[in-house]
Amino acid sequence: MIRPLSALVLLALLLAAPALADEVQLRNGDRLTGTVVTLANGTLTFSTPYGNVRVPWTDVTSLIVAEPILVTIGGKTALQPGGTIALAQVTALERRRPAFVIDGGANAGLITTAGNTDVNNLRMDGDVVARGGENRYSASAAVTRAQDRGVETARSWSTALKYDRFLSERLFVNGNAILTSDRFRDLDLRSAIGAGIGYQVLATPVVTLTADAGLGYVNENLASQPDDSYTAFRESATLRVAVVRDRVQVFHQHDGYFGVTGDDNLFMRMQNGVSIALAGGFVTTLRHDLDYDRSPAPGRRSTDRTLALTLGYRF
């Protein structure tokens, strides 16, 4: 007997356009969009824009997969080209993964005025993450320029590079580098490198939290003062919270280098903000960046802040 579709628990395998995302419906009414990673040992791993989510297979009421996937039914695995399958029959799902999965985006904000005021501000930033097997590579950069009546008032840039090697699904070792230049802080170049161990603390449909710690080394080349360097303890954390699923996300990320040599050495950089998805991959982001140096160059302040509203694109 064929029951109504609403009463069936089905796995729909659709030959859809590659741009479409997978969709999973949960027993509590939640709906997630993203990409199926695997189904193994009764747990579905589902990739969302905010990180991987692990869901008990028994909590899934329907699953739509946009591209062919390896499905295990009754001990036999096949590449499904389309159709529907009862979820109870499925014991495993697996992707034919490409060598690398790349995610990222770029944002820009520009303010220009003329007449009684003459101000020009430019802010650009971007990030990219490439994951292949146990290896993950991350890079980000930001540039800020500002002029007021023809006088430069801000000129800075920073970039961060990070490599993670996963030892298990959540545990990883890593190495990182942060480079910063800021004319108005007398900072030709600050180089901070570190290595340590990290852990994916949370990975839910709403919240993802990653933390890592280790040792680091900081070298500061100043324009008009003697250079400085020190060994440091390093810690970092990234938090993302989906306030409105697939639409509004708040985020926090920071890196801190706490000096264990020298006198009163410490620097920390932090980003906080909210990102709103628009349409077709476009997003608008309100972001507050903070850079704190407990021992700045003489005559400079310890804290620099940048508040930016940008329009960008995620791919």
Image: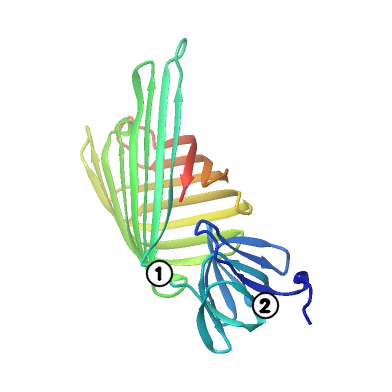
On screen, 63 above or below 228? below
Please state which amino acid type lies under the numbered disc 1: Phe
From the viewer's side, name the closer residue of 238 and 301: 238
Instruction: Looking at this view, name the residue that lies furthest to the top.
Output: 116
| Residue at x-position 35% and y-position 64% | 174
Q: Can the viewer see residue 265 in this picture?
A: no
Please determine whether, in this image, residue 208 is positioned above or below residue 171. Answer: above
Image height of 77 relative to 168, above or below: below
The one of 106 and 80 positioned closer to us in this rendering:
80
Tag in front: 1 or 2: 2
Image quadrant where residue 177 sits: bottom left
Quarter holding the N terminus?
A: bottom right
Which residue is denoted by mark 1 in the rendering?
172
User: On the image, numbered disc 2 is attached to which residue?
Assistant: 58
Q: Residue furthest bottom?
A: 75
Classify 66 as above or below 291: below
Give percent across and percent down for residue 13. 58, 70
The image shows residue 71 at horizontal and vertical percentages of 54, 79
**Which label was assigned to residue 209?**
none
Mark 2 belongs to which amino acid?
Thr
Task: Please rate how many residues cluster around mark 2, counting C-alpha atoms within 10 Å: few if below 14, some from 14 to 19, many from 20.
Answer: few
